């Protein structure tokens, strides 16, 4: 598919466009979004992967010989190498996610840190503090997963390595992770696990 530029009219799913004003920032959708964020981003992390999502479901990624496997299996392998995983989510993860997670002792023992907040509606991914994503897609198969274009949700987001863009995402994630939003929260009574 041809690349489109920001503001150049209607783009097609899977196309990408460079945003004006920020070097290293692209607006992506469809398979291009999955490839850039998951395949070429998350699965190649060397130090850390931070994810914020409203919904957390078992997501599959392509493996050797086009066989698909739960992304958590790959997370477990990466955690053994020292990659840190942190996930903010709004709801209890899906049953399939919990079953995959429970079958991976390295993740259960701290290889994947989870924090739940009913107010979280963010969708962001930060890889190694050098690549960032924010947009409409949840960390689900239909959002950022390897589903075909005919089965994937229609999602759109900004992905890039612009230092100011990534730093802004990290700042919001950090503020959440230490519980700044808990102070004065009006939904504390429905929060299953307040940070502070």
Image (cartoon, helix red, strand yellow):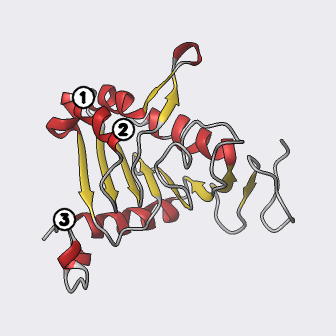
Relative to 14, 77 lies left or right: left
Specify the quadrant that holds the C terminus.
bottom left
Relative to 18, 39 lies left or right: left
Q: CA distance from mark 1 to mark 3?
A: 23 Å
Q: Nearer the viewer, mark 1 or mark 3?
A: 3
Q: Position of residue 51 (x, y in %)?
A: 39, 52
User: Residue placed at 25% from the left, 85% from the top?
Assistant: 186
2 or 3: tag closer to the N-terminus: 2
Specify few, some or many for label 2: CA neighbours under 10 Å numbering under 14, 14-19, or 20 or more.
Answer: some
Q: Secondary structure at mark 2?
A: helix
Looking at the picture, does residue 110 appear above or below residue 154? Answer: above
1 or 3: tag closer to the N-terminus: 1
Relative to 101, 138 lies left or right: right
Q: Secondary structure at mark 3?
A: loop
Q: CA distance from mark 2 to mark 3?
A: 20 Å
Q: What is the number of the mark on residue 104?
A: 1
Q: Secondary structure at mark 1?
A: loop
| Residue located farthest toward the front when viewing the structure as drawn | 95
Query: Mark 3 sits on what residue?
Result: 192
Answer with the quarter of the image where residue 192 lies. bottom left
Answer with the quarter of the image where residue 168 lies. bottom left
Q: Position of residue 49 (x, y in %)?
A: 37, 45
Q: What is the number of the mark on residue 96?
A: 2
Q: How many marks?
A: 3
2 or 1: tag closer to the N-terminus: 2
Answer with the quarter of the image where residue 156 lies. bottom right
């Amino acid at each position: 598919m041809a690349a489109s530029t920001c503001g150049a009219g209607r783009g097609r799913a899977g196309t990408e466009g460079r945003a004006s004003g920020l070097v290293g920032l692209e607006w992506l959708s469809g398979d291009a979004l999955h490839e850039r964020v998951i395949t070429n981003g998350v699965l190649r992390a060397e130090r850390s992967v931070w994810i914020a999502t409203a919904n957390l479901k078992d997501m599959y990624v392509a493996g050797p010989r086009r066989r698909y496997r739960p992304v958590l299996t790959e997370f477990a392998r990466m955690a053994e190498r020292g990659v840190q995983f942190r996930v903010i989510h709004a709801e209890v993860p899906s049953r399939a996610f919990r079953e995959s997670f429970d079958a991976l002792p390295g993740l259960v023992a701290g290889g994947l840190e989870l924090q739940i907040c009913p107010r979280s509606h963010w969708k962001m991914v930060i890889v190694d503090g050098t690549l960032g994503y924010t947009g409409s897609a949840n960390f689900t198969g239909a959002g950022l997963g390897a589903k075909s274009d005919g089965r994937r949700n229609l999602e759109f987001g900004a992905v890039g390595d612009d230092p100011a863009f990534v730093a802004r995402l990290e700042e919001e994630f950090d503020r959440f992770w230490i519980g700044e939003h808990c102070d004065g929260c009006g939904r504390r009574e429905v929060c299953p696990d307040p940070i502070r």
